[in-house]
Amino acid sequence: MTATFDTFVDDWRRWHADRNDGLRQPLGWLSLTALYWLDETPTSFDDAPGRWHVDGGSVIHELDAETTTYEPVEGAPGLEAEFDRGFVEVIQRTGRFGIRIHDRTAPALASFTGVPVYEPDPSWVLTGRFEAFDEQEVVTTGAVVDGLEHHHPAAGVIRFDYGGAEHELVAFGEAGGALRVLFTDATSGVTTYPAARILQAGRPDTDGIVTLDFTRAANLPCAFTDAATCPIAPAGNRLPFAVEAGERDPRAGEGA
């Protein structure tokens, strides 16, 4: 092997190790065990202390004669209410309020051995050309939970060549900043998670050139837990070929 290839593989293995370390965090995505939607009726849950209900635009938590009010922001990371094994995350999604349970004793944490991946292949590092929209657009996608929507600021499109044809991906992010792409391909639902994978494309250079390193295509949290509310890929970001690179579906029973 050449020194360049060795360096590429070493860098990729560090990225993969960092991904695994992040997922091993005791209250990260693998600790997420449940998602409950709330209404106006105070309700108790076996794995969330106290009673919870919605009052207008707020979530009310009653525990030991004390009442706490939470006002989660639409689409933003949730607000935290601690309990002995972790925390309850209070969220708002598409106008609905819910709570998610983060439990450091979650079985998924105990059994995690690493994300299954394709072996790193530098032929999957492609060059793209970013073309900015005249004005930033908002792209609406569905979610892995029926009835929810996600609204993404989109800066433009990335065009790239593969297999003798030109392809196009809508890129999310702010104008002049780092870009990211949600996409599916012919492996989706076969060896990779069906809803989407995410690819960080970085900031375009002065000529609009970006690197699409598909060996670092990563799973969203919904690939690991049913309690996530991740977006699905926009319709225009469904590649017609198989991207046999990056992370595989952790639910497909494949070893790390």
Image (cartoon, grey):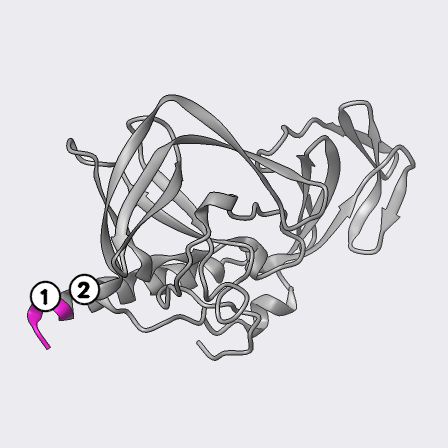
**Position of residue 138 measured from the top left corner of the image (x, y, whole percent):** 50, 28
Mark 1 Cα shell of 10 Å, populated few (<14), some (14-19), many (≥20): few
Q: Amino acid at mark 2?
A: Phe
Residue designated by label 2:
8
**Position of residue 113 measured from the top left corner of the image (x, y, whole percent):** 48, 74
Q: Is residue 214 left or right of residue 127?
A: right
Q: Quadrant of the C terminus?
A: bottom left
Residue designated by label 1:
4
Residues rendered magenta in the picture: 1-5
Q: Compared to 147, does 124 lie above or below?
A: below
Q: Amino acid at mark 1?
A: Thr
Residue drawn at (49%, 58%), measured in percent from left and top?
25
Mark 2 Cα shell of 10 Å, populated few (<14), some (14-19), many (≥20): some
Residue drawn at (66%, 58%), measured in percent from left and top?
226
Q: Quadrant of the N terminus?
A: bottom left
Q: Compared to 202, does 248 lie above or below?
A: below
Q: Are marks 2 and 1 in contact (CB under 8 Å)?
A: yes
Is residue 79 visible in the rendered image? The answer is no
